[in-house]
Image (cartoon, rainbow, N blue to C red):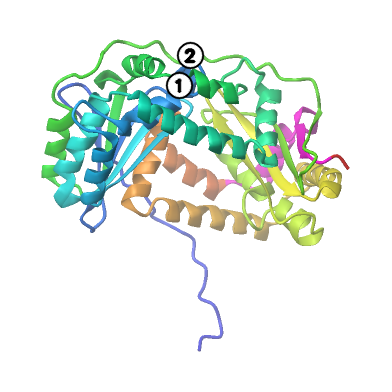
Amino acid sequence: MRSTPPPIRPMSGFEILRPERRKMKNGMPLNIIKAGSQEVVRLDILVGGGQWHQTQALQALFTNRMLREGTNSMTSAQIAEKLDYYGAWLELSSAVNYGFITLYSLNKYFPRTLAIIAEMLMCPTFPEKELEVVVETNRQQFLVNSTRVEVIARKQLHRSLFGEQHPFGRFAVEKDYDRVTSDVLREFYQKYYHSGNCSVYVSGKVTPEIVRCIEEGIGTAPWGDVRPLSPLQLVEPQTTTEKHVFVEKTDALQSSLKMGGFMMDRAHPDFLKARVMVTLFGGYFGSRLMSNIREDKGYTYGIGAGIVNCPGSGVLAITTEADNHYIDAIITEVYREMDRMCNDLAPQEELEMVKNYMLGDFCRSYEGPFSLSDAWIYTETAGLDDEFFARSLEAIRSITSEEIRTLAQRYFCKESLIEVVAGKKV
């Protein structure tokens, strides 16, 4: 039995596999990531239309979700039955500025599963009967989530930071589900779902036959109402002047605390090293916040901090849930840890631990073909260049304790943080 651990060696020579980039005949970008040994591939279709672009609440979400509920030649049951028969898995999701269609398929059945996806993408019918079922299911989930203190606090923090006229400060309410109709979804689909507004990623054991199927299936002729779209218009946040916001929920067993304030966006030169600083502060299990508030004080099971990215800005967010009586003490300790980072240099041992954690997490996150696809999709949706990951690695490796203290002094502004608590009044 071994009595001494193996030596820790610095990571070297790590490089993320870059996709092979092509333009298909109809102009759609095709990104090919050849990695992995299993006979399976993942297809991602990105549509440049999300919550930021909708003219009413839930429009982007349900347009994307309803793609699988019927086409010109298939019902929702037939789509589900065929995908199940071929052992395929389909995910549909909508984000701030994109809609996503993700297919996992065995290589040998890819031509058949792609044909299903292509018809869903190009010929959806948005049937009323199926829409009623989907809307009602989502409404019930919405009502359940709306009772959770974590959801209440998160929404209130966004309203307080951005204002209710900002896309990040507006949230659906129950009556919005009554306004979702097939015509509303068709309007969004017609404007944003076309070959001039989509890009494609394929990852896994990608063969020339699979590439040919994609090019022939969705990349040959233009489809949809292809027209130029206006660039995304940023909206100026209207931040509240209230420092502390309390939302009462009388039956809450514990409270949710969200603290947040504006920081730089991903294009800022400080961003990559600021991520290291925030990770040391509250971004992993051994962070300052966890060591103090969880391990030492025992106020909560977990507390974390991170930079939440959104178009044009970033938000430093600190979040936890705890017994109602501990919330004020937790806020005090959060500010105490901020002061420590602004005043004292991080010990070299602690800094090395954070670096090793982030480098190891980096390797784990991008070691498989599908996680590689996630990485490059992230750069596209965030408007980043191909050198982003190389710069990220260099920022982690090179940052010093002095730089961390300087960044904390620059960006840890206690006066600008808004404190939102949702829970029972003590």
* Residue drawn at 60 percent across, 17 percent down: 166
Tell which residue pokes out farthest to the right in this image. Answer: 426
Q: Position of residue 282 (x, y in %)?
A: 67, 48
Q: Residue 228 versus residue 108: which sits nearer the camera?
A: 108
Residues in magenta, as a range: 399-424
SS for tag 1? helix
- Counting every numbered tag in the picture gives 2
Residue 203 visible in the shown view: no
Q: Give amino acid for label 1.
A: Gln
Vertical arrangement, residue 275 with respect to residue 303, above or below: above
104 left or right of 187 in image: left
Label 1 sits on residue: 59
Crowding around mark 2 (Cα neighbors within 10 Å: few <14, some 14 to 19, many 20+) is: few
What residue is drawn where x is 52% and y is 72%? 7
Quarter placement of the C terminus: top right
| Horizontal side of residue 308 vs 61, given as left or right | right
Q: Are marks 2 and 1 in contact (CB under 8 Å)?
A: yes
Q: Nearer the viewer, residue 204 or 184?
A: 184
Q: Amino acid at mark 2?
A: Thr
Name above or below for residue 373 compared with residue 11. above
Residue 154 horizontal side relative to residue 23, left or right: right
Crowd tier of the residue under label 1, counting other residues whose Cα lies within 10 Å: few below 14, some 14–19, many 20 or above: many
x, y (%) of residue 34?
A: 23, 48
Q: Position of residue 174 (x, y in %)?
A: 59, 26
The quarter holding residue 420 reads: top right
- Measuring from the top left, give residue 69's x and y in whole percent: 32, 32
Identify the residue shown where x is 55% and y is 36%.
Answer: 140
Residue holding disc 2: 55
